[in-house]
């Protein structure tokens, strides 16, 4: 019997504490979409720059490489567990850098996924290159794949075209890194900005969809999902980050805060079409929506 670490009163935001591979094998449920921000294996004792200060790149033991072969086997195992929890018409998004994205792409292909896009997320405010011996890294990559090569997936083409000024949206996205207002409850060392997750969710899911994040961290995926009228399950091993996730969810039970966040996102990245000047994040009890088994 699984006991959630946290389940919101509206039942739209659930957190589990533990190893995602083991937990995903222990219940029966299918999700419409998965976003995963797995370890990049970058914690190697190096130095980076944040807010003008030199800082260590070490994030924690969970981000250290165990060698190419072990890292690859780990990626394949968690991706296999996620594939089993994805609807046949569902899609998965995985973020990374050149350190891990090629291994992820190999695993996706071997497991039978069809890769749809490799999004290049170019940050408008990247950290500077401290060594000055190679090009600055302003980008991260996000692979988008569907579970079954011959089963059509959902893509909100018209919305993506409209918010892109009437032309087809390309796979190069210029969006800012995490803003200060997104850290009001604390932060995760690899926290993604709400604007990136909002675009992903609006592009690939319909309202009331179930979204899974197996490495939820501070649950940007879940906050974006709830702000946009979707449902969410997040898994993480860190109680510290799960507590931040809980606080972030409880923060947006305040409807004024929901409006504030949506307005900030619209100014920051124009995530909605001009005609969509309506209140998102309202609770809906839609008949027939399947609930989590815990």
Image: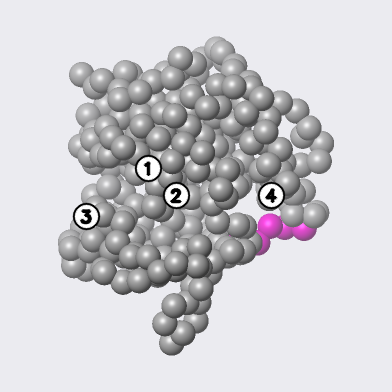
Q: Is residue 146 in view from this perspective?
A: no
Left or right of 125, for residue 46 = left
Q: CA distance from mark 2 to mark 1?
A: 7 Å
Quarter of the image for the C terminus: give it. top left
How far across and down, in percent of the image, does residue 1 sit? 20, 19
- Tag 1: Cα neighbours inside 10 Å, few (<14), some, or many (≥20)? many
Magenta-drawn stretch contains 169: yes
Q: Are dots 3 and 1 in contact, CB under 8 Å?
A: no
The residue that disc 1 covers is 217
Q: Earlier in the sequence, mark 2 or mark 1?
A: 2
From what the image shows, is residue 275 above or below residue 253? Answer: below
Magenta stretch secondary structure, dominant: loop
Task: Give the mark, 3 or 1, whose residue is nearer the N terminus.
Answer: 3
Q: CA distance from mark 2 to mark 3?
A: 17 Å
Q: CA distance from mark 3 to mark 4?
A: 34 Å
Tell me: 200 left or right of 293: right
Where does label 4 land, which residue? 268
Is 133 drawn above or below residue 187 in the view shown? Answer: below
The earlier-in-sequence mark between 4 and 1 is: 1
Q: Position of residue 6 (x, y in %)?
A: 35, 23
Who comes first in sequence, dot 2 or dot 3? 3
Q: Which residue is mark 3?
A: 61
Label number found at residue 191: 2
Secondary structure found at label 2: loop
Neighbourhood count class around disc 4 (C-alpha, 10 Å): few under 14, some 14–19, many 20 upward: some
Region in magenta:
167-171
Residue 43 location in percent, x, y?
28, 63
Crowding around mark 2 (Cα neighbors within 10 Å: few <14, some 14 to 19, many 20+) is some
Q: Verify CB contact (< 8 Å) between mark 2 and mark 1.
A: yes
Instruction: Tell me the element at label 3.
Output: helix
The tally of labels here is 4
Q: In front here: 120 or 139?
A: 139
């Amino acid at each position: 019997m699984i006991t959630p670490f946290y389940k919101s009163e509206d039942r739209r935001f659930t957190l589990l504490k533990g190893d995602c591979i083991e937990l995903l094998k222990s219940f029966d449920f299918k999700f419409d979409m998965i976003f995963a921000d797995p370890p990049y294996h970058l914690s190697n004792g190096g130095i980076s720059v944040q807010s003008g200060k030199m800082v260590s790149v070490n994030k924690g033991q969970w981000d250290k490489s165990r060698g190419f072969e072990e890292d690859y086997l780990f990626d394949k195992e968690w991706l296999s567990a996620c594939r089993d929890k994805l609807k046949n018409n569902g899609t998965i998004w995985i973020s990374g850098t050149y350190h891990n994205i090629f291994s992820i792409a190999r695993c996706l292909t071997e497991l039978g996924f069809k890769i749809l896009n490799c999004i290049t997320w170019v940050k408008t405010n990247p950290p500077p290159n401290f060594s000055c011996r190679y090009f600055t890294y302003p980008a991260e990559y996000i692979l988008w794949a569907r579970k079954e090569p011959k089963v059509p997936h959902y893509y909100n083409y018209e919305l993506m075209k409209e918010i892109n000024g009437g032309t087809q949206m390309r796979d190069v996205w210029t969006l800012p890194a995490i803003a200060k207002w997104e850290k009001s409850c604390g932060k995760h060392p690899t926290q993604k900005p709400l604007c990136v997750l909002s675009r992903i969710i609006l592009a690939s899911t319909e309202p009331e969809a179930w979204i899974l994040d197996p490495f939820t961290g501070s649950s940007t995926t879940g906050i974006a999902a709830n702000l946009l009228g979707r449902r969410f399950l997040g898994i993480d091993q860190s109680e510290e980050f799960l507590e931040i996730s809980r606080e972030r969810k409880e923060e947006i039970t305040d409807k004024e805060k929901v409006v504030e966040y949506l307005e900030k996102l619209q100014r920051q990245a124009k995530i909605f079409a001009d005609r969509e000047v309506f209140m998102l994040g309202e609770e809906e009890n839609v008949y027939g929506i399947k609930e989590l088994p815990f």
